[in-house]
Every structure is written in C-alpha cells, then in structure tokens.
C-alpha cells in the first residue's frame, strides 16, 4: 500500500511518541529498579559490598563532656551545676573483618572494628584532651549502685575498699584529664594487701568490668572507649546479603549465632532492622526505617519528618528518639520490669551493659521536664541534640546522618554509706556523643552519575520523543485535512457555473464568470 509521505511521517512520529511513553515511564523505571536491586545487594560483585565492608572515608565522632563545677555542694545535697566541654572531635574509621558468606541462607557474618583518631584542629577552640574535668566517679558510683541493688549487706566492705583504692575519697567525683578518661586510661592500683580493696579488685577482674584493662604489677587501667579503639569486637553479627530479596539487605538475623537476644522480654529480644550501615532501596515516606543497635541492645525506629535535600539531591528526613517506655506498649518490654520503667526519654542500660547507666538524648531532650529542673546548665535543642538522617529514597543511601546519645548515672542517695548519704539522688549527665556521616563530594557525584544523570537524560529523551509524536500527529492531521479540502474543492461535483444575461450589461462589457473546480470549456451564452 503506497501511503502518502505525510501519513508515513505521522506514523513514525506516533511511534516515537509511543516509544517515549513506554520507555520513559514503563521500561526505564523497571530497568533502573532491576539494576539497583543487583547493585544494592551485598554480593561480592557489587561496589556496595566493598563500601559496606570498609567505609573509605572517616565518620565524625564527637564527644561532649560535662564538667561539674560545685562538687562540694553536691556532696551536701545541692543541685548539680554542669558546664559542657567539647566537642572533642575524632575521625572514626569503620570496617568489618572476618567476613564470611553463607550461600545457603543468603547471609553474611562479620565482626566490627572501629578506630578513632583525635583531631584537635576540628575540636572545640583550644581543646587538647589534657583539660582536667570533674565528673561523677565511674567506678565508685556504679559499683556502689550495683552492690546496693543486689548485695546491700556488703556496702560497708565496699566503703573500706574505696578508702584503700582511692585514698579515702571525700566525695563521689573524679578529677581526671579528658583524654585519660576517654581513651588513654586512668590507673587504679590494685596491689593491696588489705582484704577489702583486694577483694574488690578480684571481683572486678572476675566480672570483666567494661573499660578495665589489667596491666603489669596488678594495676588496672580504666577508660571509656580505649578498649574498643582499633580492636576487633568479640560479637559475631549475621545479616542478610539481599541477593535473593534486596529489601532484606543488611537485616540483622543473629548475633553470636543466636536468632534472638536474651536481654529483655517478649518481642524486644527480636532483631529488627538493619545493622545501621546499609539500608534497603525504594523506601517510601510512609514506611518506618529500622536500625538495630548492638551497643544498646535494641532496635530504633525512625519515622518520616519532612522532605529535605542535600547538594541538589532530593531526600527524605527521618528522626527518632529514646521513647517513653512506660507509656508505649511496643517499648514497655525494654523496662527492667513491667512496673519499673524509667522516666520518659530514658532507657535503663543495666540489662544490656551490666552497668547502672541510663541513655537519653543529649541535654535531656524529649525527657520528663522534672529531670531538666534537677540540673543547672542543660539546654536541649532539637537541632543540636536530636537524631536525624536524610535518605535518598530510591537507593536508600543516607547522605547525612546524626546519631546522638547521652549517658547518665543516678547520684545514689543511701544512708548505708557515708559518701552517699547526702547526695541529691538526681539523674546526672556524664557525656554525650554524636556520630555523624556527611557523604563526601566524590560519592555524591558517583551517586548522581549512577542514578540521577541517567534519569535526567531519559527524562529529556522521553519528553522529546513524546513531543515529536504529538507534533507529528498534529502536523499529519492538519496536512491531511488540507489535502482533503483541496481534493473536495477540485472535484467535478463541486464545480459552479454562473450564467450572465448580456441584456443586463448596459455597458456591453463582459461579465466575470466564476468557476470553482476543474477548468471547464467556456460556457455558451445565448445572444
């Protein structure tokens, strides 16, 4: 069939438009989704696997200490006055070691290894780590609290042990250099012949108290983070690789071979969410993001707050908090007992860490206001102290993240020990940390090239093709319509002859004869 040229061009334009619609809105999204499913899994063939095993850039790890300015008054029952000192900025390098794949259940096991490097140039003005601070004693108070809780009859002996180990302390505070407390360690002399200090040191050694390292000559070195710096963690974590189902990528399924914790009760013992270093793609705003924290033995749920952006990339902002354990059915199983929940905004860490500490957001943000009144010097600010993560929703990549937590201890009041009988019994902040991620420009560029550049190119192409289709169809219709009009006008049936009566022409001038249609022989006019 020999079609007119404009019909052929119109058909081609319509085909281009249809292809633009199918490819731009149907085929390309499906291809992109399929490719992302492959790339976002923890298969050995993907770049994601390498980035997940060893993060090629440092995270920001900031520590803020609280210096107590009125220890003598606190010892007599006064409200504590604190001054924040910080940040102490560290580069945190994270990697996973002893990595093993398990094809049979699409899982991978690993151990964590984190290394911290102090950056005085990025720390608070003039901070070197040699600053002397006064803080609640991180051995005297915890040990007394645990003995008071479990074996109160031994409090008298514990008091004698403290007198021997810490030279008859006058209060429950320690004067220590910041870097010694955090990483280097402060020394405890356990080379005693007296029964009480010797028994306490033996007990601490037997219980493997967190932060204590046995040195030569029966000396102990105590620090908060020194034991985990550049040290392989003892726990074996098992997560899904996401090869079979990318939505499971990074999901924690076991720790140390156990598919559930034995810390809490009920569903709080279950592993929910990813390990916090990778998240599944295609997360919509109405979905919660879950991340399991091994340090706190619990899952944190993050919920959508608002649309955001980072360096030209559209993101979704998610936020989280500690929660109100007493009034949240989902979180109540994190309480020490159903009728013994901590105040709003606090979490008792004893069952998890075996230390009588409480976690909260910094400066008691989102906590029961009563506790904020019991401390002078705290100023909660949601922008400075909240938990927030900005996710690119298609790839599930966190472009920025700020995870913050504060550790606190109760200044125990008891008449059974002289050092503790006048303390205010308030919740006392120790320090807070911020672990933050800001994706470097090189990775932003890589993400744009991998994800957004193809989308933009295809977006332009699909609209060009659709425009060609629309314009081509319109032009074809117009052309076809014009030709039909011309064909109709020039057909014999459309010819019209006008007869002129010469008698009506007084000037004997020939009248114009209007002819429409094919040229006809001159008509005969009766004279």
Image (cartoon, rainbow, N blue to C red):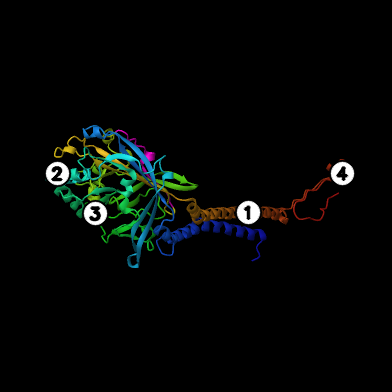
Check disc 2 and report the residue beneath it.
Answer: 155
Lower position in the chain sequence, tag 4 or tag 1:
1
Lower position in the chain sequence, tag 1 or tag 3:
3
User: Which numbered disc covers residue 432?
Assistant: none
Check disc 1 and report the residue beneath it.
Answer: 477
User: Which numbered disc covers residue 217?
Assistant: 3
- Judge depth for marks 1 and 3 and give the one in front: 3
| Residue 490 falls inside the magenta stretch | no
Q: Quadrant of the N terminus?
A: bottom right
How far apart are the two marked residues, 4 and 3, measured between alpha carbons?
140 Å
Q: Residues within 10 Å of mark 4 (few under 14, many from 20)?
A: few
Q: Is residue 513 left or right of residue 3?
A: right
Q: Is residue 184 left or right of residue 315?
A: left
Lower position in the chain sequence, tag 4 or tag 3:
3
Q: Residues within 10 Å of mark 2 (few under 14, many from 20)?
A: some
Can residue 516 be seen at all in this image of the molecule? yes
- For the residue pair 113 and 462, the one nearer the viewer reads as 113
- Judge depth for marks 2 and 3 and give the one in front: 3
* Residue at 71% from the left image edge and 55% from the top image edge: 493
Q: Is residue 508 left or right of residue 147?
A: right
- Tag 4–tag 1 contact (CB < 8 Å): no
Q: Secondary structure at mark 3?
A: helix
| Part of the protein shown in magenta | 376-393
**Extreme residue in the bottom direction:** 104
How far apart are the two marked residues, 1 and 2, measured between alpha carbons?
98 Å
- Judge depth for marks 4 and 1 and give the one in front: 1
- For the residue pair 156 and 145, the one nearer the viewer reads as 156
Q: Residues within 10 Å of mark 3 (few under 14, many from 20)?
A: few
Check disc 4 and report the residue beneath it.
Answer: 509
């Amino acid at each position: 069939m020999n079609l007119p040229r404009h019909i052929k061009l119109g058909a081609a334009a319509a085909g281009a438009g249809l292809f633009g619609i199918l490819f731009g809105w149907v085929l390309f999204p499906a291809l992109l989704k399929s490719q992302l499913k492959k790339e976002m899994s923890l298969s050995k063939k993907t770049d994601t696997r390498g980035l997940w095993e060893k993060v090629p850039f440092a995270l920001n790890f900031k520590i803020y200490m609280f210096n107590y300015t009125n220890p003598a008054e606190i010892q007599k029952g006064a409200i504590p006055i604190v001054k924040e000192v910080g940040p102490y900025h560290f580069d945190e390098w994270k990697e996973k070691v002893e990595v093993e794949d398990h094809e049979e259940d699409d899982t991978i096991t690993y151990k964590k290894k984190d290394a911290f490097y102090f950056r005085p140039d990025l720390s608070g003005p003039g901070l070197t780590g040699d600053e002397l601070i006064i803080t609640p004693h991180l051995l005297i108070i915890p040990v007394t609290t645990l003995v008071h809780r479990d074996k109160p009859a031994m409090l008298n002996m514990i008091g004698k042990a403290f007198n021997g180990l810490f030279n008859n302390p006058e209060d429950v505070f320690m004067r220590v250099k910041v870097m010694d407390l955090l990483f280097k360690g402060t020394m405890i002399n356990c080379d005693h012949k007296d029964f009480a200090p010797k028994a306490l040191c033996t007990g601490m050694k037997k219980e493997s108290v967190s932060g204590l390292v046995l040195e030569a000559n029966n000396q102990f070195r105590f620090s908060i983070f020194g034991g985990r710096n550049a040290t392989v963690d003892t726990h074996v974590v098992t997560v899904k690789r996401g090869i079979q189902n990318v939505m499971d990528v990074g999901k924690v399924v076991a720790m140390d071979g156990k598919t559930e914790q034995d810390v809490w009760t009920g569903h709080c013992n279950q592993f929910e969410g990813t390990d916090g270093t990778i998240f599944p793609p295609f997360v919509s705003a109405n979905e919660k993001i879950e991340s399991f924290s091994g340090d706190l033995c619990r899952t944190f749920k993050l919920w959508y707050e608002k649309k955001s952006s980072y360096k030209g990339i559209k993101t979704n902002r998610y936020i989280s908090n500690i929660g109100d354990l007493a009034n949240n059915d989902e979180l109540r199983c994190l309480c020490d007992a159903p009728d013994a929940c901590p105040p709003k905004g606090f979490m008792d860490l004893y069952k998890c860490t075996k230390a009588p500490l409480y976690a909260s957001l910094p400066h008691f943000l989102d906590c029961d206001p009563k506790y904020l009144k019991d401390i002078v010097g705290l100023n909660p600010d949601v922008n400075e102290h909240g938990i927030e993560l900005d996710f690119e929703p298609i790839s599930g990549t966190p472009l920025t993240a700020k995870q913050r937590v504060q550790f606190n201890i109760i200044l125990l009041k008891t008449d059974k020990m002289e050092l503790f009988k006048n303390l205010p019994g308030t919740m006392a902040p120790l320090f807070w940390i911020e672990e933050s991620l800001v994706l470097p420009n090189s990775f932003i560029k890589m993400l744009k090239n991998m994800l957004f550049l193809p989308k933009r190119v295809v977006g332009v192409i699909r609209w060009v093709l659709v425009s060609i289709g629309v314009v081509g169809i319109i032009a074809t219709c117009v052309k076809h319509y014009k030709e039909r009009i011309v064909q109709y006008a020039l057909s014999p049936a459309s010819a019209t002859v006008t007869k002129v009566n010469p008698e009506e022409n007084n000037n004997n001038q020939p009248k114009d004869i209007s002819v429409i249609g094919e040229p006809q022989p001159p008509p005969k006019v009766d004279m």
